[in-house]
Image: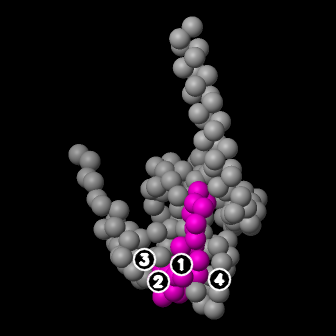
């Protein structure tokens, strides 16, 4: 028997566990953190923040609407944080420090555990974050390439 639980309810339980001092893990849901983290494949391991939150960190926060989100810190300005997923082309914020309840400390990507000391993690925390304003161009190019490839496949089927 499979039991389906709404993400908001599930993350609320995990948030309570984190606030009690537990370290917890969950499978990534959603595509906003691609290409670093993939939906229903990769796992994140997170715990209560130690009070230090810096650019490049992946954190969990609760929006004022009640929704829970895990994104990367893109900018810090006077105890206010601006976030974005690795696949997004816009900032969300300001997010207040009290809205942030956990920091991602490791991820399982394709069966391999990574931490902030690993090169791939550093690439996304530093370089991919710095390419933020170029992402729109990168995403547009990817869509064009996919369109060309799919048109080419259609043409080949006609032959």
Residue at 65% over, 36% down: 145
Using the image, determine if residue 90 lies above or below residue 152. Answer: below
Residue at 66% over, 78% down: 75
In the picture of the structure, the residue carrying the numbered disc 3 is 63
Q: Is there any visible trace of residue 108 in the rendered image?
A: no
Report the span colored magenta: 81-102
Disc number for residue 144: none
Check whether the beta carbons of the residues at disc 3 and disc 2 lie within 8 A of each other. Answer: yes
Q: CA distance from mark 3 to mark 2?
A: 7 Å
Using the image, determine if residue 129 lies above or below residue 42. Answer: below
Q: CA distance from mark 4 to mark 1?
A: 10 Å
Mark 3 crowdedness (10 Å alpha carbons): few <14, some 14-19, many ≥20: some
Where is residue 151? Give x, y as percent. Answer: 58, 25
> Is 120 positioned to the left or the right of 2 in the image?
right
Where is residue 47? Give x, y as percent. Answer: 52, 75
Which of the two labelled residues, at mark 2 and mark 1, occupies the earlier sequence position?
1
Q: CA distance from mark 4 to mark 2?
A: 14 Å
Please check the rendered image and state whether residue 3 is part of the magenta-colored stretch, yes or no. Answer: no
| Camera-nearest residue between 123 and 32 | 32
> Is 47 positioned to the left or the right of 77 in the image?
left
Residue at 58% over, 86% down: 80
Residue at 53% over, 73% down: 92
> Is 136 positioned to the left or the right of 98 in the image?
right
In the picture of the structure, the residue carrying the numbered disc 4 is 76
Which of the two labelled residues, at mark 4 and mark 3, occupies the earlier sequence position?
3
Q: Describe the element under mark 4 as helix, strand or loop.
A: strand
Disc number for residue 93: 1
Residue 85 occupies quadrant: bottom right
């Amino acid at each position: 028997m499979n039991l389906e639980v709404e993400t908001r309810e599930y993350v609320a339980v995990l948030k309570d566990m984190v606030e009690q001092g537990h370290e917890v893990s969950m499978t990534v849901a959603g595509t906003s953190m691609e290409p670093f983290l993939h939906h229903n494949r990769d796992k994140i391991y997170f715990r209560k923040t130690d009070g230090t939150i810096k650019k490049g960190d992946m954190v969990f926060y609760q929006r004022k609407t009640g929704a829970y989100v895990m994104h990367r810190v893109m900018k810090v300005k006077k105890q206010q944080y601006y976030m974005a997923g690795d696949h997004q082309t816009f900032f969300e914020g300001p997010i207040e420090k009290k809205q942030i309840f956990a920091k991602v400390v490791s991820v399982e990507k394709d069966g391999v555990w990574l931490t902030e000391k690993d090169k791939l993690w550093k690439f996304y925390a530093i370089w991919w974050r710095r390419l933020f304003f170029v992402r729109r161009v990168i995403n547009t190019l990817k869509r064009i390439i996919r369109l060309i490839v799919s048109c080419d496949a259609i043409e080949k089927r006609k032959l």
